[in-house]
Amino acid sequence: MKTREQQMEFLYKKLEKIRFGMLSTIDPKKGIIRSRPMTNKQVDPAGVLWFMTSDEAATTFEVDRDHHVNISYAEPSDNLFISVSGLARVVHDKAKVHELWHALDKAWFPKGVDDPHIVLIRVDITAAEYWDSPSSKVVELYELAKSITTGKSAHDVGEHAKLNSL
């Protein structure tokens, strides 16, 4: 079993490799949870995630009304699944926008890096949970078959960790 520090290091290394997550916010007008794909712009080992959006997007209004968010990540080819809970806020920081800007961002912001509507969403992670199973299908099938024959729960295949109060 990994120590908490090893779990944290594992979590951040995996988050850095997953390009997209589904950011969930609460729509106060409809009283529903809404999710939309967002690109990881930066994963800070200090427990901060950065995303880029427009100040005209519903996401910014929802984050301003309720700071509690969740980002769900899936890398099915690697049998990796991560759920991150955190407190989000909209950040107006042109220097940080320039730091995080990538040429592909122009697809969403045709005016370029100096588009006045670009804002950042900063998420301070408060809790996370991950499931990491063997990435090889052969190994995974072997472990599942072993669990059936030995009576060991399939939940014990791979690694699962809950990280709270981050």
Image (cartoon, rainbow, N blue to C red):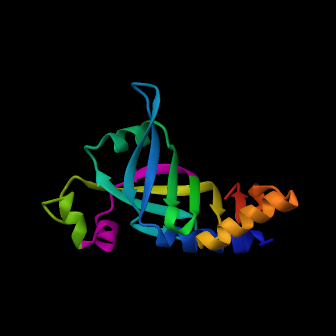
Instruction: Tell me where residue 35 appears, x and y as whole percent.
Output: 42, 43
- Position of the N terminus by quadrant: bottom right
In the figure, residue 129 lies in which quadrant? Answer: bottom right
Asked whether 103 or 149 is in front, the reply is 149
Decide whether residue 101 is among the magenta residues. Answer: yes
x, y percent for residue 60? 35, 44
Horizontal side of 154 relative to 95 (left or right) equals: right
- Whether residue 45 is visible: no
| Horizontal side of residue 113 vs 70, given as left or right | left
| Quadrant the C terminus occupies | bottom right
- Magenta stretch: residue 82 in it? no
What is the number of callouts on the image? 0
Q: Position of residue 126 (x, y in %)?
A: 62, 54
Image position of 78 with respect to 115: above or below:
below
Q: Is residue 37 left or right of residue 75?
A: left
The quadrant where residue 111 appears: bottom left
Q: Please, which residue is most extreme toward the top here?
A: 30
Q: Residue furthest left?
A: 111
Q: Which residues are magenta?
A: 85-102
Residue in the picture at 56% in, 74% down: 13
